[in-house]
Image (spheres, rainbow, N blue to C red):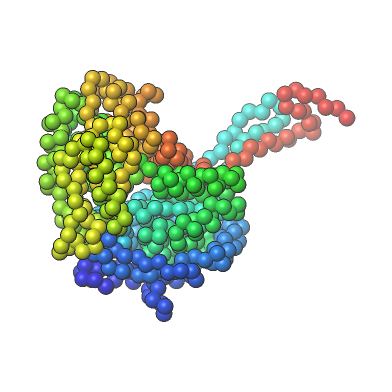
Amino acid sequence: MSKIATEFGIDAALKALGIKEINDGTSTGSNYFASGEIIESYSPVDGVLIAKVKTTSKEDYEKVMAKATEAFQTWRKKPAPQRGEIVRQFGDKLRELKEPLGKLVSYEMGKSYQEGLGEVQEMIDICDFAVGLSRQLHGLTMHSERPGHRMYEQYHPLGVVGIISAFNFPVAVWAWNTALAWICGDVCVWKPSEKTPLCGVACQNIAAEVFKANDLPEGISCLINGDYKVGEMMTGDSRIPLVSATGSIRMGKIVAQAVAARLGKSLLELGGNNAIIVTPDADIKMTVIGAVFGAVGTAGQRCTSTRRLIIHDSIYDKVKNAVVDAYKQLRIGNPLDENNHVGPLIDTDAVGMYNKALEKVVSEGGKIIVEGGVLEGNGYESGCYVKPAIAEAKPDFEIVQHETFAPVLYLLKYSGDVENAIKIQNGVVQGLSSAIMTNNLREAERFLSVAGSDCGIANVNIGTSGAEIGGAFGGEKETGGGRESGSDAWKIYMRRQTNTINYTDQLPLAQGIQFDL
């Protein structure tokens, strides 16, 4: 273990999460076995190798699917409230292990420790939500046109749900899907990002402990590890009726085509190019807090990170100067140290994309007003720490049309009515999160109207990131159209069935059709 890992208790966290080293040098847990190639997990915090994890081979995958499909036969027959009790126990285990799991998330992914704890809290929250939902999987009843008939709808489990998650939220997004899928009677097979495999092993260990304590099949929760080739095993597998995938637009299009080719269902949560509109009636102090956290939180590696700040020309300089001054106060460094605001990017490939984005905006005629750059020297040995940057740009710049998964904020200017700002905001292919800062009720309502924001999330006087689990999370356009977490997102994890019951001794047909024998 490195000096940082020892100082901040990472070794103790791994032990608490059941991750141990085995003979061949790989680290794993009590309920994860694989025989494929080895992937190494390096911390972006200090560049140190945390552990090695074996990937899932084709033979391993078939064993996993056999366990999952067998477990489904048992799990689906459990009454939903009993499934809710299991999820409640899982949530309680997360409460017990919140600190070690939060530390692992921070150390393996690079987000701040506070954000790591927040991510685990999201897992706890979705478990609480799912427990209540287990007694509310409502169908509908409707009147039949035929006398002596009753008609209603009900929902049944789908089967095996495949989950492909991204590195930036290495545990929470899995829990969003899994807690709801379990409540619905499904079993889950999860492929975490190959950049954060230990977070996946830790979660699998926690789930396995709960299922074992309740004498339930281990196949209710399954883990597979590896790169896109392992993901392809799921997307092409007709035994998996639903694949939930989080990642880039490019990845989502590949997944969507593969799943659609076998007429399966996909739930896609893809890229975001999120904007905050700042009108003349905005509260500047609130705007600065929302914009800065949205742009630099998780080092700009949230799908809901603020990429564009669309500011009215009458207050442009005032807002620009306030945001620039706020950036001067940012502390960049070890994310486990709670004195720091910004941690590292996930790896040096992400650093390369960050540098290219800054070069591109300048080549298109933009102006860098808060200089970026890669940090070097003591505390930055991993090569993954960069300075959050701000650039003045125009809406039609090619780089502004794309999602840069790094702390780069583009300032854009608009004039005239708020409709002009909404047009700029909607003028990208992504449609995840959006926000407006205004104390003008008319502007707020226009932003939320049918002709307003075209995103799946539209906020007033808060930033673009920080969604709560009570609302359905997801976006439109090339963000994929999926919905996870709260509201009625549970319905995608179930199949819908219409039932008609005839309790008479006659057989009238619908639409008055006569058929006599």
Q: How many marks?
A: 0
Q: Is residue 350 above or below residue 253?
A: below
- The location of residue 381, given as percent across then percent down, is 21, 64
Please tell me which residue is depicted at 19% across the width and 51% down the height of the picture: 373
Relative depth, front residue between 353 and 339? 353
- The location of residue 395, given as percent across then percent down, is 28, 31
> For the view shown, which residue lies furthest in the right direction?
517
| Image quadrant where residue 63 sits | bottom right
Please tell me which residue is depicted at 45% across the width and 40% down the height of the picture: 480
Please tell me which residue is depicted at 20% across the width and 45% down the height of the picture: 389
> For the view shown, which residue lies furthest in the bottom direction?
23
Relative depth, front residue between 514 and 460? 460
Which of the image's four quarters has the N terminus? bottom left
Please tell me which residue is depicted at 56% across the width and 44% down the height of the picture: 260
- Along the horizontal axis of the image, is 155 left or right of 273? right
Q: Is residue 409 above or below residue 345?
A: above
Q: Is residue 327 above or below residue 114?
A: above
- The location of residue 28, given as percent across then percent down, is 41, 70
Which of the image's four quarters has the C terminus? top right
Can residue 16 be seen in this snapshot?
no
- The location of residue 369, given as percent across then percent down, is 15, 40
